Amino acid sequence: MTINHKELATAGDILVVDDSPDNLRFLKDTLTSEGYRVRPASSGQLALQSIQAKLPVLILLDVRMPEIDGFEVCRRLKADETTQAIPIIFASALTDTSEKVKGFELGAVDYVTKPLNAQEVLMRVATHVSLFIARRQLENKNRELQETASELNQYRKYLENSIQEL
Amino acid sequence: MSHELRTPLNAILGFSELMSLDKSTTQAQKETLGIINRSGAHLLNMINDVLDISKIEAGRFEVDIQAFDVIKLLNEIGEMINVRAASKQLGFSVDLAVDIQRFIKSDSKKLRQVLINLLGNAIKFTSSGKITLQAHTKPFTCSDRLMLVIDVIDSGVGIPEEKQTELFKPFVQLVQENSDMQGTGLGLTISKSLIELLGGQINVSSVLGEGSTFKIELPVALATHADIAAEENYRAVKSLAPEQPNWRLLVVDDSMDNRLLLVTMLVNIGFQVREAENGQEAIDIFKQWQPDLIWMDMRMPVMDGYETTGKIRQLVGGDKVKIVALTASAFIDQHNEIIKAGCDGVLHKPFHIPEIFAALTKQLGVRFIYQDAPVTATSITSKITADMIATLPLALREELHEAALILDTDDIEAVIVKIRAFEPEIADGLEALAKSYQFDQIIQLIEKNMT
């Protein structure tokens, strides 16, 4: 898959969620330097509110946060029809396999472990944003095809009717 | 295993800390006590890390990032190493760059462990000449993070090139014949894992017969003095603040030394304290004395802390008493089990005295008088209130609300610029909140006066 960076950056916003301001700054700076538009949320609650206000194309989600943790944020997003398609990458210091599995079971597309590595984050983000774009393009193509098919169908009916009348 | 190793250390560290807080201790004694304390703490760190090697191998390890003073850390390590270097008649110097960033954020405990390990090795493998601890920081070009670079340089035997890659593997010891050079063989493996865990790397370069240089390159975040001052001010509690209930505290621990440490400290401050050496005694005292808080050692013979806590919770008033577990377990996993058993909080042994006071404040709302009035750092952040926000034009408030909700940092900045034209003070406050990503605060401030 070839990645077109200009296309990635204009695809939409990336929401990063982490209760540590340092991590938010790191992720924001890292992603902004590649041209992405980044929205930093310092809590699960704020993230959920903000996602409702405007849908991002990707969410980088810290697991361990006070009150609403990353797993819970993910659960709620996946339960909601309008938000369930947004890809989620978990970021966490937990390297325990069972925690990773839990993240994937909840519907995450990927997992990065802390301490975060800028290069790794950028690669994974690029992959999932391009997948998201590809899927969106596929959906559009699908819709066009369906529209064309139904148009063709109407013409066929019209022709059939005309033949019968003749 | 960890319990047996930690209990005697608990007593050593606790009493030396207590003695150094005593007013009658002379300055010279304080310095000696400081060395006892730091060396004890170092020993404890080593025990922890030997236990942690299993965690490293299992790929599970917790990082504790906090602000610290790197100059202080390096000088502290230097003092300790200096004693050891002098006893081998080696030169030792700490060589810090003049422009080193003093306040940084990383895991200082892990960094200390690594440096002590590297310097310890340097002393071990150097018979004449000197050892140097060098450090500097350099900024990254496109980030506000820094690279902390530390070199440990010795004039020792050196490491043959073909052995240099093997050096960091577990249980590899290059020199095994000499009985003076005993170690676990885990030191460098742990050091490498720890530095990598913190996002850095560690490398060695060496010339046989001339010496070796171990270089640590660690990306760290910048901190401010205020981040650290908050922790330091914490320490010196003098007595209980006036107009509080006569707090009654019960100390339950089968080890007399541990009880004595806690009781002495609490009585000095002005609490009423009683002690129990086992679970049954704790239950009896609870029934007749009704303490406000119980310090509960979790591991005791006959009736352990879990069972005792469970029984007390069944008694009249047992639902109200605060119970804080004291555990020597090195594993954070245990924490959940203890809370499930009915405890309100957990302290890990050996605890630091400020942790005890912090727990009392958290559980009971106890207030203290501090020895030196803490110096309040002058805050640049002007406090803004919902009422101040309400004075702004509605359109601006709505624009800010929308931008904050979407978390669009560019839009938020743009609105703040507009607000600055009306009320620079409000703009400053908002800017401070935005800088620390507290957009939820901004939203709340606006929503308070919007219906």
Image (tube, coloured by chain):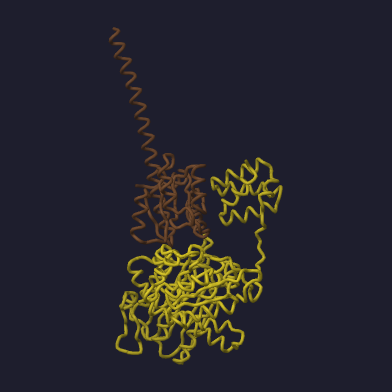
The residue at 34%/50% (across/down) is A105
Q: Position of residue B282 (x, y in %)?
A: 46, 73
The residue at 52%/77% (across/down) is B274
Which residue occupies the extreme front position in the image? B288
The residue at 46%/75% (across/down) is B252
Residue B118 appears in the picture as rendered: no
> Quadrant where the C terminus of chain B lies?
top right
> Quadrant where the N terminus of chain B lies?
bottom left
Image position of B419 (left or right of B335): right
Image position of A154 (left or right of B418): left
Q: Position of residue A113 (x, y in %)?
A: 40, 59
Residue B378 appears in the picture as rendered: yes
Chain letter for the brown colouring in the rendering: A
Answer above or below: position of B39 versus B138. below
Query: Residue B292 or B171: which is nearer the viewer?
Result: B292
Chain letter for the yellow colouring in the rendering: B
